[in-house]
């Protein structure tokens, strides 16, 4: 029994040690060779979708481009979820991806969306390809906005699915505070409006109860139902469907005023100026086809270039990648491959803006007495879970990567003495490396640099450290009297002291200053 118990403890120790080791460059490279896909997960049930309206153009194209907004059928929506195979991290960021197709065509299994989901998952994200309701009336500017709004509702329902899962069984190990959304074309519209159409007052009027021509030759009117609030349709409606950030491949926003402040969600955009489907600047979508369709009537939208200008004005955190020859499929390099920059640029944006720990500083002695070479160094805690400390010219006395402090036994004879810290976040995002170089001597001069002040404030000393046993303390002459208070309880030993003119040192209580020589 004792042997079994020791073996169990040893196993738990090694398991804990392995789990404490963050992977190298998660989110910055394809760290995982494979991904695991779970297909057709139901996330939204019985949501109303308009029925096709018929007519010449629907018959010609086979697409629901003349839908009857007043006549709906309930449908269920599903998603495919991709996870890095073998990943043991318990909390991970999520990217929800929506396909393009003008809200009238397409599906979650589109090849380029699958490549996006797979390759982002290999970098350490959980990814989800979602379906959303199709059907638009392209002959009525107001009614067409209902299609976009339904898509936004469905995207928010997908966000809510994962927030509910994180609050319950946590099947997918998603961080509910780091859910991002985006897609291509209409899928990008869904992501963009998730971020910026976030108030009831911003809803298009036609998404409330609205009238539509109906009946024989359209001579009658029918009432289109109220589409309800952003989080009122689908499942898990007690959750909030807002994502934290957005990526957009050839997307646009309905109104630039939806982008309101510097604190709005971050966005990374990709768009080509020769896009004839979604305007790079502003205009009607499908401008390259509108001439061939009698009665075509879609609203003006504002593409990535205009959104970028608006974001600059507001001071938002954003990134814009403009092109000139990629057309509407700004991410597709041919019919089977993505442009090589797309996945790294999406991943890097989320990493730098939202996942990476802040730059850490190292606090501790830079000038070390050779007689006392063991020192403790600290850094800020809070946004890191793992601290990778390395010491050149010294040994780490307490190698615990979960702690924001470390004790170093410096070797005075080493030619270089450097302490380096690399922090990792709770999501294993690698922070910037920070280093300090330590000087070890038998004697240092430590000079008082303030006028009147407190002895125990290290910032009053030239070494940014309180006097210690190898220090030669220098109190420079002052033009007028200054007072240096030594607080009660202070016992300070140092090598020598040189006092200049007009220096008054006041010892409070049992404070002591001890000159060793």
Image (tube, rainbow, N blue to C red):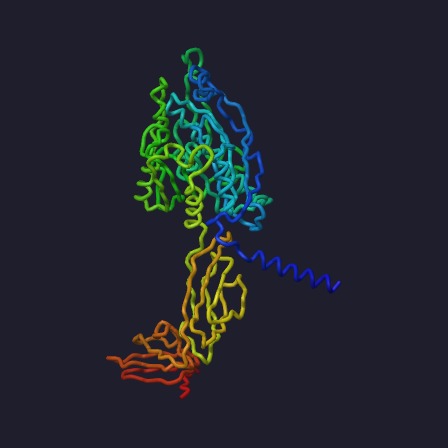
Q: Which residue is at 44% across, 53% downward?
A: 356
Nearer to the camera, 371 or 236:
371
Q: Which of the 4 quarters of the picture holds residue 328?
A: top left
- Residue extending farthest to the right is 1
Residue 449 in the image, given as x and y percentages of width and height: 31, 75
Q: Which residue is at 47% across, 60% downward?
A: 381
| Quarter occupied by the C terminus | bottom left
Nearer to the camera, 161 or 14:
14
Nearer to the camera, 504 or 57:
57
Left or right: where 235 falls relative to 489: right
Residue 445 higher or lower than 182, as above or below: below
Residue 62 in the image, given as x and y percentages of width and height: 47, 20
Left or right: where 152 falls relative to 449: right
| Quarter occupied by the N terminus | bottom right
Residue 473 in the image, given as x and y percentages of width and height: 36, 81
- Residue extending farthest to the top is 216
Q: Which residue is at 51% across, 35% downward?
A: 130
Q: Is residue 452 visible?
A: yes
């Amino acid at each position: 029994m004792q042997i079994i118990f020791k073996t169990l403890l040893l196993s738990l120790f090694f398991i804990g040690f392995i789990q404490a080791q963050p992977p190298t460059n998660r989110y910055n490279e394809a760290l995982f060779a494979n991904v695991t896909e779970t297909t057709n997960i139901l996330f939204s049930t019985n949501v109303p979708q308009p029925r096709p309206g018929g007519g010449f153009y629907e018959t010609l194209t086979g697409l629901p481009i003349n839908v009857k907004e007043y006549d709906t059928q309930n449908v269920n929506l599903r998603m495919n979820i991709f996870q890095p195979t073998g990943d043991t991290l318990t909390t991970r960021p999520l990217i929800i991806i929506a396909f393009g197709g003008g809200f009238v065509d397409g599906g979650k299994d589109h090849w380029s969306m699958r490549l996006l989901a797979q390759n982002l998952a290999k970098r350490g994200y959980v990814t989800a390809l979602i379906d959303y309701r199709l059907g638009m009336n392209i002959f009525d500017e107001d009614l067409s906005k209902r299609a976009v709004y339904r898509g936004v509702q469905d995207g928010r329902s997908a966000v809510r699915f994962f927030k509910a899962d994180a609050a319950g069984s946590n099947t997918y190990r998603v961080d509910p505070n780091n859910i991002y959304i985006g897609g291509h074309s209409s899928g990008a519209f869904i992501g963009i409006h998730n971020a910026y159409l976030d108030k009831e007052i911003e809803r298009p009027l036609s998404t409330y109860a609205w009238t539509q021509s109906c009946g024989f030759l359209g001579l009658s009117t029918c009432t289109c139902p109220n589409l309800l609030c952003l989080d009122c349709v689908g499942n898990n409606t007690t959750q909030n469907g807002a994502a934290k950030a957005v990526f957009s491949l050839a997307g646009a926003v309905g109104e630039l005023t939806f982008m309101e402040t510097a604190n709005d969600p971050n966005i990374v955009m990709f768009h080509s100026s020769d896009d004839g489907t979604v305007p790079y600047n502003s205009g009607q979508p499908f401008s390259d086809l509108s001439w061939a369709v009698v009665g075509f009537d879609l609203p003006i939208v504002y593409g990535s270039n205009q959104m970028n200008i608006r974001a600059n004005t507001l001071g938002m955190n954003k990134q814009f990648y403009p092109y000139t020859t990629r057309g509407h499929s700004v991410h597709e390099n041919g019919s089977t491959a993505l442009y090589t920059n797309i996945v790294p640029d999406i991943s890097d944006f989320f990493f730098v803006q939202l996942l990476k720990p802040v730059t850490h500083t190292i606090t501790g002695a830079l000038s070390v007495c050779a007689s006392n070479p063991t020192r403790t160094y600290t850094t800020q805690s809070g946004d890191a879970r793992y601290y990778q400390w390395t010491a050149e010219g010294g040994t780490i006395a307490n190698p615990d990567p979960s702690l924001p402090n470390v004790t170093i036994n410096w070797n005075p004879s080493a030619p270089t003495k450097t302490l380096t810290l690399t922090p990792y976040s709770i999501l294993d995002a690698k922070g910037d490396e920070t280093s300090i170089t330590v000087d070890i001597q038998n004697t240092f001069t430590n000079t008082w640099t303030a006028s009147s002040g407190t002895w125990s404030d290290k910032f009053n000393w030239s070494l940014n450290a309180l006097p210690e046993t190898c220090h030669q303390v220098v109190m420079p002459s002052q033009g007028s009297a200054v007072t240096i208070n030594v607080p009660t309880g202070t016992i300070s030993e140092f090598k020598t002291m040189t006092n200049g003119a007009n220096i008054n040192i006041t010892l409070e209580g049992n404070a002591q200053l001890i000159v060793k020589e």
